């Protein structure tokens, strides 16, 4: 959040010695590596989504057992009288640093970060913009994380801060303004033995679809912060085009909202318009930057709007409200009746290989039901399957990770999302499921265990075209899957293959080629373990050349009728899919030829295997 000054010291002091006693009593095993895997950085979680061991910023927040075991930490947070988001104890080892960075994603637009040093020395320095401070033990500070900032621990001790995020309320911000503009004697806030307090935590913090007012606020602010590095008239013309693009997007979003609000029917339209925005801003180049931190505006839009504007797994409108935490037993969950999933049709493919076009073509037949699009929530709604969870360092999942309880929960969740070709909710005792989520290409053994009679349709695309499209998706910023991947510098886009850690520092074309190669290699290895009658191979170029013939082949394989809906859909040129970045064009990949062509010789053995794979 932007502040009046880089640092603002708040007029409260806390009992650092008492806080030190409480953190010393917390389990050593509660400390985990920093979400970005920074050397010497670790954290102990106090408020998280669901009160569990995670670093998410989207979802209903609750205290963890660590916070519930720490009465003074609870009193410190309750003292401010605000609603808290993700909050942690942050440890910085001797000689360690938090490198220079700026916080640009949607979470930070409305939130400020409170720091209360618990263990520190004068040799710990906090830098923000052109200022540097030492935060002393027991003090309370906030800072402007929209500006570039870093931390250096030049001491021989482990520095520990209480770090808590909040949007703040009017009383909080009146206090901040007073602290920023005048000298206020600090109030000491002592520990009160036996005092019980309530802590309000965010329950609604992500919209299903951002309403127009939120989009307007985010983009108006960004336009005001944007400058062009081009001189003179060229810069003014570029800024004019940029402002018109963002204004047009805001108006189109408002029109869509007037038609759909945040309903399921609108989701594809919102996504399509969002992708068009990213494409338009990308076409302007890298000369548009944020004045205060010099970040490319495309990256900021991708993190502020692209990654958070559409979240179909969220139920109902989001907002920032919560009530004090109460120790109540969880409500019993209703029994959910699930249909019989008869021979699900699961499309597996490398990212950006045309799987959305294939999915949207098959989805027109009333013979199939689908979850309304990509279903990342089906797997990643389980925290145990997110990268970083024990035993999970990528999107790869094998059959041994599926339990009967998880299988039932997944089938139940699907049952509540399924729609037919007309978009109506599924209401039948037996359905044919159509599923296409790119990450699931690395989870074939897992889904084979979930659906033992599933039919897998393997779609592959020539490496030149596919790798070029992956490169474009990364650069557009609209396909970010992990905004803060531990061990990676910056956001990660598209699926996360095993071995991604070795790509750190590699150029983008090599990352894209690795995603293409590893995904296709994994798919073939996994499908070879299944009976031949449960796999079917489609080449993307064949699908484009004769969609009717390819869809007839899929129908024969899956036991579907090539009905009127499929015939009409494939009777002419296929419409662009909702994830198309730029319109299809022969040789489009050649704009990245200089980066892609040197990689192709090393992929020849895999390409030969693909061409022979049946």
Image (tube, helix red, strand yellow):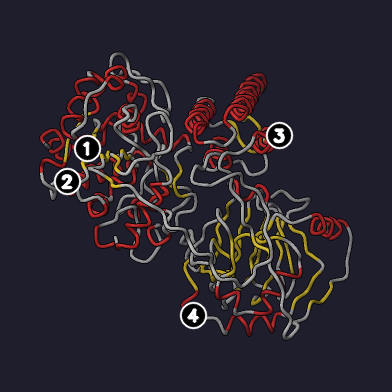
Q: Which residue is mark 1?
A: 458
Q: In the drawing, what numbered circle is on residue 81?
A: none
Residue nearer the viewer, 83 or 248:
83
Do tag 2 and tag 1 residues touch (Cβ < 8 Å)? yes
- Residue situated furthest top in the rendering: 572
Residue 348 seen in the figure:
no
Q: Where is residue 175 drawn, in percent x and y?
A: 83, 60
Do tag 3 and tag 2 residues touch (Cβ < 8 Å)? no
Residue 220 seen in the figure:
yes
- In space, the residues marked 1 and 3 are separated at their CA atoms by 47 Å
Q: In the image, what residue occupies the spot 34% across and 57% down?
A: 408
Sequence-first disc among 1 and 3: 3
Say if 478 sits above or below 17 in the image: above
Q: Which residue is mark 2?
A: 527
Say if 113 sits above or below 578 in the image: below
Sequence-first disc among 4 and 3: 4
* Image side of residue 558 versus residue 410, left or right: left
Few, some or many residues within 10 Å of mark 4 (<14, 14–19, 20+): few
Closest to the camera, between mark 4 and mark 2, is 2
- In space, the residues marked 4 and 3 are separated at their CA atoms by 46 Å
Do tag 4 and tag 2 residues touch (Cβ < 8 Å)? no
Q: Which residue is mark 3?
A: 224
Few, some or many residues within 10 Å of mark 1 (<14, 14–19, 20+): many
């Amino acid at each position: 959040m932007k502040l009046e000054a880089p640092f603002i010291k708040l007029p409260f002091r806390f009992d650092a010695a008492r806080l030190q006693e409480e953190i010393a009593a917390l389990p050593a095993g509660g400390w985990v590596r920093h979400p970005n895997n920074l050397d010497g950085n670790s954290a102990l979680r106090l408020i998280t989504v669901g009160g569990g061991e995670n670093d998410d910023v989207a979802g209903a927040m609750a205290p963890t057992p660590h916070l519930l075991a720490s009465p003074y930490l609870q009193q410190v947070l309750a003292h401010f009288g605000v609603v808290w988001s993700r909050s942690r104890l942050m440890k910085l080892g001797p000689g360690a640093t938090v490198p220079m960075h700026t916080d640009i994603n949607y979470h930070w637009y409305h939130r400020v970060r409170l720091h209360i040093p618990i263990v520190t020395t004068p040799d710990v320095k906090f830098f923000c913009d052109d200022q540097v401070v030492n935060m002393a033990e027991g003090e309370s500070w906030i800072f402007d994380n929209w500006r570039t900032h870093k931390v250096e621990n030049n001491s021989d001790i482990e520095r520990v801060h209480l770090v808590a995020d909040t949007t703040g309320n009017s009383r909080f911000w009146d206090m901040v303004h007073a602290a920023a503009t005048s000298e206020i004697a600090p109030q000491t806030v002592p520990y009160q033995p036996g005092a019980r307090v309530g802590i309000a935590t965010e329950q609604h913090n992500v919209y299903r679809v951002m309403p127009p007012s939120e989009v307007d606020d985010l983009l108006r602010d960004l336009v005001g912060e944007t400058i062009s590095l081009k001189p003179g008239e060229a810069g003014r013309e570029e800024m004019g085009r940029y402002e018109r693009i963002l204004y047009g997007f805001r108006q189109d979003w408002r029109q869509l909202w007037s038609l759909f609000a945040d309903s399921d029917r609108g989701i594809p339209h919102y996504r399509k318009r969002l992708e068009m925005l990213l494409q338009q801003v990308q076409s302007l180049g890298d000369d548009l930057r944020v004045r205060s931190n010099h970040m490319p505006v495309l990256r900021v839009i991708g993190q502020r709007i692209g990654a958070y504007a559409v979240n179909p797994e969220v139920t109902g409108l989001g907002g920032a409200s919560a009530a004090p935490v109460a120790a109540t037993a969880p409500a019993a969950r209703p029994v959910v009746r699930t249909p019989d999933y008869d021979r699900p049709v699961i499309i597996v493919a490398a990212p950006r290989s045309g799987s959305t076009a294939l999915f949207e073509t098959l989805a027109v037949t009333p013979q199939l039901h689908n979850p309304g699009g990509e279903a990342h929530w089906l797997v990643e709604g389980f925290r145990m399957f997110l990268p970083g969870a024990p035993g999970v360092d990528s999107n790869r999942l094998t059959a041994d990770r599926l339990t009967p309880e998880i299988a039932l929960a997944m089938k139940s969740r699907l049952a509540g999302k399924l729609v037919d070709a007309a978009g109506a909710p599924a209401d039948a005792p037996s359905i044919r499921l159509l599923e296409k989520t790119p990450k699931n290409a690395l989870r074939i053994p897992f889904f084979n265990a979930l659906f033992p009679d599933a039919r897998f349709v393997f779609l592959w695309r020539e490496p030149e075209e596919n790798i070029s499209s992956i490169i474009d998706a990364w650069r557009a910023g609209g396909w970010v899957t992990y905004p803060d991947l531990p061990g990676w510098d910056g956001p990660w886009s598209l699926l996360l293959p095993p071995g991604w850690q070795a790509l750190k520092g590699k150029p983008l074309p090599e990352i894209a080629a690795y995603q293409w190669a590893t995904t296709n290699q994994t798919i073939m290895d996994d499908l070879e373990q299944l009976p031949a009658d449960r796999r079917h191979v489609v080449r993307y170029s064949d699908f484009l050349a004769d969609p009717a013939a390819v869809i007839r082949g899929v129908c024969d394989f899956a036991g579907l009728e090539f009905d009127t809906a499929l015939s009409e859909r494939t009777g002419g040129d296929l419409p662009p899919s909702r994830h198309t970045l730029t319109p299809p064009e022969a040789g489009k990949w050649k704009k990245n030829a200089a980066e892609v062509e040197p990689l192709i010789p090393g992929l020849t053995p895999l390409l030969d295997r693909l061409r022979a794979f049946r």
